[in-house]
Amino acid sequence: MLAPCAALAEPGNPPSSDSAPQPPEPTVEPARTPTPTAAPSSPEPTPAKPSPTPVPAPVASAPSAAALPAPSAGTARIRLAIDYPNAWLETRHFGETGAWQRGCAAPCGQLLPVDGVELRVNAPDMTPSKPFRVEPGSGAALLKVDGGSASARAWGRASFAVGVPVALLGMTGFALGSFDDRDGLRTAGAVSLGVGAALILVALPLLVHGATDVKNEKGDSVALRKPSEAL
């Protein structure tokens, strides 16, 4: 049997491209661009609220000299320095004998009418000062008061009031007893005279301790109630 004839290619001549099957071209797929994944957003920090700044408490300042009212005619500003509590500067019209009126409490520092007015300083348990006057004008009258004890003054007055008549009585008895040569009367008179003199001697320092003295800024007395004026 004859094999079917097959078309044989000539040696040295490759088969033509029309007859040879072409290998399939590789398909190149486009590169995929990865989709960026959004990072989880972190919560924005909340700004801290500023702490309130403490406001300092207002400090009360002393009134300046410019804040003080200007003195008017017939007035003066008086300031007291006194060693007794609850003291008052009292006033009344000059030449009158009526009751004293309270002007201002120590240390005062207020404007007071002083034209035709006399003043004094008074306090509980203190002997009132002798009346004095202050001339009107600007500035301030600075007064220092050395207060006297009212109780010492009262005891001094009582001791003096008893001592004087007892001493006079003793002097009279001693004189009569000596004149009539009566020893008993003379002795009694001498004893009475001694007691009266002792009471007077006790009264004097009490009256001095009970005297009130008012001095100006120079140290001069402007109102000194003497012991004799306390009787």
Image (cartoon, rainbow, N blue to C red):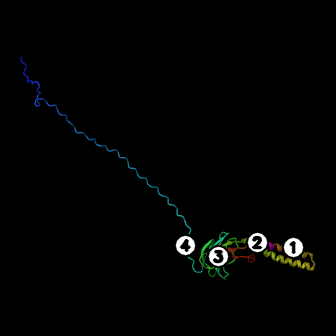
Q: Residue at x 56, y 72 (%)?
A: 65
Which of the 4 image quadrants contains residue 149? bottom right
Q: Is residue 214 left or right of residue 63?
A: right
SS assignment for the magenta stretch, majority: helix
Residue designated by label 2: 206
Which of the 4 image quadrants contains residue 11? top left
Q: Secondary structure at mark 1?
A: helix
Q: Secondary structure at mark 3?
A: strand
Nearer-N-terminus badge (3/4): 4
Q: Residue at x 89, y 79 (%)?
A: 175
Q: Which region is colored magenta?
A: 199-206
Q: Is residue 68 magenta?
A: no
- Whole-angstrom CA distance, mark 3 to mark 2, is 25 Å
Residue designated by label 1: 191
- In the rendered structure, which amino acid carries the disc numbered 3? Glu
Nearer-N-terminus badge (3/1): 3
- In the rendered structure, which amino acid carries the disc numbered 4? Ala
Residue designated by label 3: 90
Nearer-N-terminus badge (3/2): 3
210 or 132: which is nearer to us? 132
1 or 4: mark nearer the eye:
4
- Whole-angstrom CA distance, mark 3 to mark 4, is 27 Å
Q: Residue furthest top?
A: 1
35 or 4: which is nearer to us? 4
